[in-house]
Amino acid sequence: MINIKNLCFTYTNSKPYLLDKVNLKIEKGSYVSILGENGSAKSTLVKLILNLLKPNSGEILISTSKMAYVAQKVENFNAQFPITVYEMLNCHRKVLKLKDKNLILKSLQAVGMEGHTHTLIGNLSGGQQQKIFIARSLIGDPELLILDEPSTGVDIQSMEDIYGIIKGLNKNLGITVVSVEHNLKAALDNSTDIFEMSSGSGILYTINDYKNKLKEERG
Amino acid sequence: MFQYAFMQNALMASVLISILFPIVGVFLVLKRYSMMGDTLSHASFAGVAIGLVLGFNPILCAFAFTAICGLSIEFLRDYYKKYAELILSILLTFSVGVGITLVSTGKAGANVNSYLFGSILTVTKSDLYIMLILSIISIITLYSLYNQLLYITFDEEGAKVSGVKVKVINYVFALLVGATISASLRILGILVMSSMIALPVATALQLNKGFKHTLIYSIMFGFIDIILGLIISYYINCAPGGTIALTSVFVLVLIIGSKRALSRA
């Protein structure tokens, strides 16, 4: 699904690189959590995959154009922004040039938020808002779903709901999931693979290998 | 009062700008870019001054200058990234510099005041045609780019990932802001232009509605502000810019007051 080869990137156009010769191969249907310390360039890697940033060298090959993104924080969104759930999802549908209006209801049903169609997004809790952003990403039947810390600012119940939804999308619909994670437990419970980043690069582990590695490190 | 040709011209021009301004305003305010209106209205001052000194149509010159400044803002936005508002200050300073230098040479004539404060007496038929063309082009463009603009306003990164040509649309929008400001010069005047971008939207935001309703209410409040301000300016014989600005503040205060009274009741 994604093949990253010798990827180098820096914001300042001068060495040292923030990402230095990163290699990563993500298979179709997998659920990869990206872990690492703050500042290990996890979100930067995701932005490069999404083509929001341009690499200095190396290449990123993605086998699908049906890609969706759930950001850690939507740039201009605040509680006062005057937009309803329906308006936001409908805007996304129209931008993707999809004619079927039922897609909005279907995507809301997939995250259990169909009762909030005409609610202002600012009036929803953090967890509900995150479910709405996931619902938006489902319009257009994505094959690749990229999330950046999906449980940031979310209560425990909503967190469980959100990971349940993401895991369901991966298992039942076969959507490949790439998720930047700060929540180790969620990553261990849900992922098929872990990409651990440090010092500008990273190593891909299967979930069992990563669990064994953690056991060894913790004695 | 509408038996006079100048009032008919002023009324038609006011109806056009009362629709156009809040549409542009709602996107600018929600992008937290309402200062762009301020910068481009000052750019229009420079454009008017160039037109008056060189003997060209001041509204067309204002459009050309605001268009160049609008495009420059978008072009330079990446240059300063996190300090994008600095570009607005730089272009505002440049525009005011050009405007004041040219006007103070005395070659612009005494006509400058009518552009600064707005004047219902000076809207000619040819001005009206220019305003009509700029307004129709702007409204059609805004209508056809509505969803892309809303997406960019709400979530620029998400819009890019969804395939919206964000940079191109931001350039087109900057041109539209320039066109809106140039079309409104005669009635509103340069000094109150930016307040008309923000005030009807600020009033509509008090109603806590979705985007479409906020847009409709912004147009409604913009229409009330401009038409009422125009009528008052006719009766008390002053520049419409001032009365329109005062009406818009009064309507905002009225809505805030009514909202508070209703929430207490």
Image (cartoon, grey):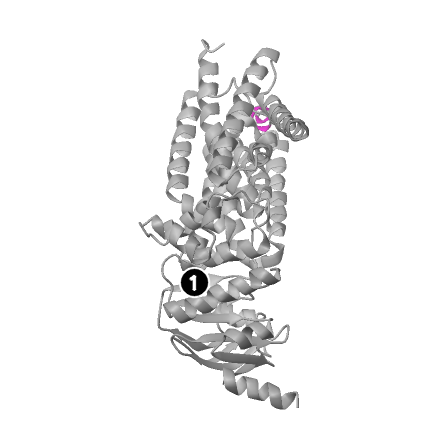
Can you give x and y, in whole percent of width and height, for residue B229 in the image? 57, 20
**Residue A68 in view:** yes
Can you give x and y, in whole percent of width and height, for residue A50 in the image? 45, 66
Q: Residue at x 43, y 29 (%)?
A: B131
- Residue bearing mark 1: A68
Q: Nearer the viewer, residue B113 or A195?
A: A195
**Residue A50 in view:** no
Specify the quadrant of the image occupied by residue B135: top left
Specify the quadrant of the image occupied by residue B241: top right
In magenta segment, residue A73: no
Q: Nearer the viewer, residue A103 or A3?
A: A103
Q: Secondary structure at mark 1?
A: strand
Q: Residue at x 51, y 34 (%)?
A: B22
Q: Residue A171, relative to residue B163: is it above or below?
A: below
Q: Residue A201, relative to residue B252: is it above or below?
A: below
Mark 1 neighbour density, 10 Å: few (under 14) some (14–19) many (20 or more): many
Q: Residue B188, relative to residue B178: is it above or below?
A: above
**Which residues are the magenta region?**
B112-116
